[in-house]
Image (tube, grey):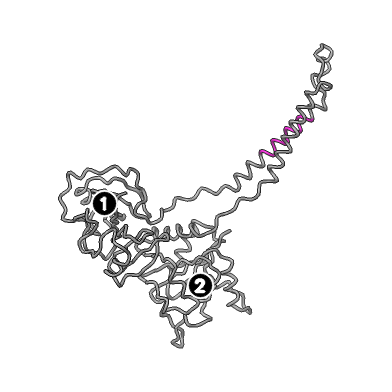
């Protein structure tokens, strides 16, 4: 049974860790989740106990708040510099054992740099981080579940050879009984006297019945075992945060005849107010936005500028393939701004090519020329996120 360790600092993540725990408990059993140090037994070396607890898990969620890096103890010493700090011990134990570690950023926190961390935590910066925002908690928490699903070990089916062997033996028994019944010296003569006695001796009928019963039992055991090991039907989960989710008909283009003209030149692969265009290299985008945080999404390179609300996603060949716009981005994409009413968007662009639920939001896909635009609309009916990428 996979185990998930939730690592957090109590004065840096008030309530968030417990809320995430409750969300995960709807997807996993509570026996799979480890969250507190309260279970540490008195009188034992807590460093060894923490190390042992982490070693039993298959993934660790490191919740990082705005004071995670700078938190100090009563003497003014930074806690992460203390080799007895439980947050450091738990993360270091997971990194040492190559247990997947997923940083979860809350309350606007950013990933630390390698120079900011002690040596045993340095490799944490090479782990892809996820955001967990209060305003979009459900969809962000579902993204954490999706990430866990990719790193947790898959349950193995138990060996069914004993049951298969039992079935083979049973079927052989049936075949043997039938052949025995059909052998010339065991066949009953077709005479009135023979029919008066019995068409089959009792011992032959009992042998066939017993063989059939064993075969039925073996089949039932195999069916039961298959039902037991088949994975349960998962709860409906939010798909991983990809702008391509939900696309069905790639050749359909929505009717934009009623839309007002736009000053945005979408075909150029660029957006007004953004310094780069689709197809540019990672190096070129980094040069244009040197303050961006390099990271990875689905093992592909990405560059985050949270303070500008810009997120750049690249192909494996490091070519810019998608731009995400989030608050506080104040510009427009094809005349649409974050916070615009989706009713106004539909008046401008018509009905979307496709729509689907994405966490608490509703994703809506448009195609304009060779460009795809995706508008994620929140429960209030306003555009909360925009994705901009080339149509395939």
Image quadrant in which you'd find residue 128 = bottom left
Give, as a single range, the part of the protein colored magenta.
Answer: 207-219
Asked whether 128 or 191 is in front, the reply is 128
Could you say whether the residue bearing mark 1 is in a helix, strand or loop?
Answer: strand
Residue 211 in magenta stretch: yes
Question: Whole-percent x and y of residue 80?
Answer: 47, 80
Residue located at (67% from left, 42% from top): 221
Residue located at (71% from left, 36% from top): 215
Dot 2 corresponds to which residue?
Answer: 91
Count of all numbered marks drawn on residues in the image:
2
Could you say whether the residue bearing mark 2 is in a helix, strand or loop?
Answer: helix
**Residue most toward the bottom?**
75
Q: Mark yes or no: residue 314 visible.
A: yes
Q: Is residue 79 left or right of residue 262?
A: right
Q: Quadrant of the N terminus?
A: bottom right
Residue located at (46% from left, 69% from top): 62
Q: Is residue 154 above or below residue 198?
A: below
Q: Which mark is residue 371?
A: 1
Q: Which mark is residue 136?
A: none
Q: Assess whether mark 2 and mark 1 are in contact (beta carbons under 8 angstroms).
A: no
Question: Whole-percent x and y of residue 131?
Answer: 38, 65
């Amino acid at each position: 049974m996979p185990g998930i360790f939730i690592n957090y600092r109590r004065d840096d993540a008030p309530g968030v860790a417990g809320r995430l725990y409750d969300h995960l408990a709807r997807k996993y059993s509570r026996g799979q989740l480890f969250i507190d140090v309260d279970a540490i037994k008195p009188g034992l070396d807590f460093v060894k106990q923490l190390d042992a607890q982490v070693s039993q898990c298959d993934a660790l969620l490191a919740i990082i708040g705005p004071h995670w890096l700078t938190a100090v103890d009563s003497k003014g010493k930074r806690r992460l510099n203390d080799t007895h700090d439980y947050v450091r011990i738990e993360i270091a134990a997971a990194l040492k054992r190559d247990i997947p570690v997923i940083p979860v950023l809350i309350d606007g926190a950013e990933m630390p740099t390698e120079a900011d961390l002690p040596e045993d935590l340095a490799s944490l910066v090479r782990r892809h981080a996820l955001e967990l925002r209060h305003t979009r908690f459900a969809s962000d928490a579902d993204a954490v579940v999706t990430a866990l699903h990719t790193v947790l070990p898959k349950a193995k089916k138990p060996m069914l050879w004993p049951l298969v062997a039992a079935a083979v033996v049973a079927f052989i028994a049936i075949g043997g009984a039938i052949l025995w019944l059909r052998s010339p010296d065991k066949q009953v003569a077709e005479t009135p006297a023979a029919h008066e006695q019995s068409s089959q001796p009792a011992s032959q009928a009992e042998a066939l019945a017993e063989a059939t019963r064993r075969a039925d039992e073996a089949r039932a055991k195999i069916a039961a075992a298959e039902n037991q090991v088949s994975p349960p039907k998962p709860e409906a989960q939010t798909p991983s945060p990809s702008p391509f989710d939900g696309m069905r008909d790639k050749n359909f283009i929505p009717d934009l005849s009623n839309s007002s003209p736009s000053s945005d030149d979408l075909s150029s692969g660029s957006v007004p107010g953004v310094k780069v265009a689709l197809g540019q290299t990672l190096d070129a985008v980094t040069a244009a936005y040197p303050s961006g945080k390099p990271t990875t999404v689905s093992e592909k390179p990405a560059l985050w500028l949270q303070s500008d609300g810009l997120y750049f996603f690249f192909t494996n060949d490091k070519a810019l393939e998608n731009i995400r716009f989030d608050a506080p981005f104040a510009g427009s994409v094809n005349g649409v701004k974050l916070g615009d009413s989706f009713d106004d968007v539909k008046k401008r662009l018509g009905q979307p090519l496709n729509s689907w639920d994405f966490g608490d939001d509703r994703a809506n896909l448009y195609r304009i020329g060779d460009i795809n635009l995706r508008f994620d609309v929140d429960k209030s009916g306003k555009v909360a996120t925009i994705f901009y990428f080339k149509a395939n």
